[in-house]
Image (cartoon, grey):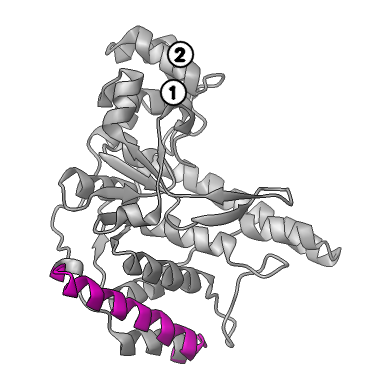
C-alpha cells in the first residue's frame, strides 16, 4: 500500500544521466512487481518461456538494469526479510484482493472481455519465491550486490542511504522517507511513456528525486512528526489510517500538536480504530529491524552466467542478450578510459 503523502512533498524531475556515478539501493520486490504489471501480453497475461514459466520480471530486470549500468548508475538490490507481525493484516488484505481479481479475470476470459482480462490480470500479480530467486541469480550474474534485509526492504534501503553506503533509496513508495532515507528516487523502473489507467492517453514518466531535508524543511516538521503524519494517513501497519484524515488534515493536526503525540493520537481516537497501540507502530518506523552486516561490491558481469540463465534456461533472444551485454561492456571500458576505474 505504502504511505500516501506525495501530494505534500517537494520533488524534482531528473534525467537518468543525472544519476550517473550514483549508488542506488533498489527495493527489489517493488522493482519486480512493476515489471510483472507492465510487461504483459494484450490480454493481460504475463510473458512466459516455452515451459510456461513467467519471464516478465526477468525481461524487465535485465533490460532496465543493463540500461542503468550503461548510464553509469551503480544499483544494489535489497531483499525483504521477515515482515513485522503488524503487517500480517495488510498481507492478508492484498492476498484477498488478488484472489478476487483472479476470479474476475476468469469471468472476463469466459466473456472474451480483453479489457477486463488486462485489468484483472494486472491486479492478480503474484511474485513467488522462485521468481525472486531467479532475479537474484540474474542480479549476481550482472555483478551487482544483493543485500538481504532483516525486515522491510525499504527500511534496509533507507539504512544503507543513511549510512552513506548508497546515495539514495530507489522505490515508488514514500515509506523510504518515513524510514529516514535522506534521498528517494522514484520511477527508476518505469521511465518513459506510460498509459493512464483506464484511458487511451499516455503520459511521460521521468525519474523523481525527493530529498528528506527538503520535505522536512517545506513542512517545518522533524522526522518524528513525519512518522506521526504518515501514521494518521495510513501505513502497512495501520491500514487506511484514521478515517476521514487525509494528508492535508494530518499535516494540520501534527503541526497543531507539535511533539505531544499522546495527545494527538488520543484526539483522533487511535485506540478506537486499531487494536495495536500507536507507540508500537511509531517504533517500527523509528527503529526498524535492519541488517548491519553486509558487503557492497560491484564487479564485471559474467556474460556466460547471464546467457545461461536467460537464453538457455528461459528462451531469451541470444542476439538481444549479447547486444545488451556488449553495450554494457563498451560503457564500462569507456568509463575506465576516463579514469573512472571504480565503475565496477
Which region is colored magenta? Answer: 312-341
Q: Is residue 290 visible to us here?
A: yes
Magenta stretch: helix, strand or loop mostly: helix
Do callouts 2 and 1 mark residues in contact (Cβ within 8 Å)? yes
Position of 13 compared to 102: left or right?
Answer: left
Position of 69 compared to 300: left or right?
Answer: right
**Residue 258, position in %: x, y?**
30, 11
Mark 2, residues whose alpha carbon is within 10 Å: few (<14), some, or many (≥20)?
A: some
Vertical arrangement, residue 259 with respect to residue 230, above or below: above
Mark 2 secondary-structure assignment: loop
Q: Which residue is under mark 1?
A: 232
Looking at marks 2 and 1 on the same chain, the residue that comes earlier in the sequence is marked by 1
Vertical arrangement, residue 25 with respect to residue 69, above or below: above
Q: Is residue 301 rendered magenta in the image?
A: no
Q: Is residue 318 rendered magenta in the image?
A: yes
Q: Is residue 82 visible to us here?
A: no
Q: Which residue is under mark 2?
A: 268
Q: Nearer the viewer, residue 287 or 156?
A: 156
Amino acid at each position: 500500500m505504502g504511505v500516501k503523502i506525495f501530494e505534500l512533498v517537494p520533488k524534482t524531475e531528473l534525467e537518468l544521466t543525472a544519476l550517473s556515478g550514483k549508488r542506488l539501493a533498489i527495493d527489489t520486490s517493488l522493482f519486480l512487481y512493476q515489471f510483472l504489471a507492465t510487461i504483459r501480453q494484450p490480454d493481460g497475461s504475463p510473458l512466459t518461456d516455452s515451459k510456461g514459466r513467467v519471464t516478465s520480471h526477468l525481461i524487465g530486470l535485465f533490460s532496465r538494469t543493463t540500461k542503468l549500468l550503461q548510464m553509469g548508475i551503480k544499483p544494489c538490490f535489497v531483499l525483504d526479510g521477515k515482515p513485522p507481525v503488524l503487517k500480517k493484516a495488510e498481507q492478508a488484505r492484498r492476498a484477498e484482493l488478488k484472489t478476487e481479481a483472479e476470479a474476475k479475470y476468469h469471468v472476463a476470459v469466459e466473456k472474451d472481455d480483453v479489457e477486463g482480462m488486462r485489468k484483472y490480470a494486472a491486479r492478480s500479480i503474484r511474485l513467488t519465491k522462485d521468481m525472486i530467486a531467479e532475479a537474484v541469480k540474474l542480479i549476481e550474474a550482472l555483478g551487482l550486490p544483493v543485500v538481504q534485509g532483516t525486515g522491510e526492504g525499504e527500511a534496509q534501503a533507507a539504512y544503507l542511504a543513511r549510512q552513506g553506503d548508497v546515495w539514495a533509496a530507489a522505490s515508488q513508495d514514500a515509506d523510504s522517507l518515513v524510514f529516514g532515507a535522506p534521498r528517494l528516487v522514484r520511477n527508476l523502473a518505469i521511465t518513459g511513456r506510460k498509459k493512464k489507467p483506464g484511458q487511451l492517453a499516455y503520459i511521460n514518466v521521468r525519474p523523481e528525486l525527493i530529498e528528506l531535508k527538503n520535505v522536512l524543511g517545506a513542512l517545518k516538521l522533524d522526522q518524528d512528526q513525519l512518522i506521526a503524519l504518515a501514521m494518521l494517513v495510513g501505513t502497512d501497519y495501520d491500514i487506511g489510517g484514521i478515517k476521514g484524515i487525509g494528508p492535508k488534515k494530518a499535516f494540520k493536526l501534527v503541526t497543531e500538536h507539535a511533539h505531544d503525540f499522546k495527545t494527538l493520537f488520543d484526539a483522533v481516537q487511535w485506540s478506537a480504530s486499531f487494536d495495536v497501540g500507536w507507540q508500537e507502530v511509531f517504533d517500527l518506523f523509528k527503529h526498524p529491524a535492519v541488517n548491519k552486516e553486509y558487503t557492497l561490491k560491484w564487479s564485471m558481469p559474467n556474460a556466460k552466467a547471464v546467457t545461461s540463465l536467460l537464453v538457455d534456461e528461459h528462451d531469451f533472444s541470444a542476439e538481444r542478450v549479447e547486444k545488451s551485454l556488449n553495450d554494457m561492456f563498451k560503457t564500462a571500458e569507456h568509463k575506465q578510459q576516463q579514469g573512472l576505474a571504480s565503475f565496477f
